[in-house]
Amino acid sequence: MALQQEMVMIPKREYEELLEEVGILHNPKLMEAIRESDEAKQRGVKTWVLKTQL
């Protein structure tokens, strides 16, 4: 059974943000750092707050 493809139009900025997110998800070191940060927050450790231009 073949998968059917569909083209969807999205703004360029949104596309670039999605590419960046996929890059982060495929980077094991970044994902480990995110997990460590989440665990630290659960233990009450104050962590950096990253601000984005959304």
Image: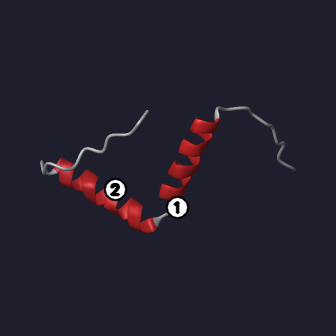
Amino acid type, mark 1: His
Kind of element beneath mark 1: loop
Question: Is 44 drawn above or below residue 28 in the view shown?
Answer: above
Dot 2: element? helix
Q: Looking at the image, which residue is at 19% across and 54% down? A: 40
To which quarter of the image does residue 5 belong?
top right
Residue at 32% over, 61% down: 33
Left or right: where does residue 18 sit relative to residue 7?
left
| C-alpha separation, residue under disc 1 versus residue under disc 2 | 13 Å
53 vs 48, left or right, is right
User: In the image, what residue type sits under mark 2?
Assistant: Ile
Residue 29, placed above or below residue 54? below
Looking at marks 1 and 2 on the same chain, the residue that comes earlier in the sequence is marked by 1
The image shows residue 22 at horizontal and vertical percentages of 55, 53
Residue topped by disc 1: 26
Residue on which the image places disc 2: 34
Q: Position of residue 11 (x, y in %)?
A: 64, 32
Q: In the image, is 16 to the left or to the right of 33?
A: right
Indicate the position of residue 35 as horizontal and vertical percent values: 32, 57
Work out whether residue 11 or residue 23 is closer to the camera in this orientation and state it. 11
Residue sitting at x 43%, y 33%: 54
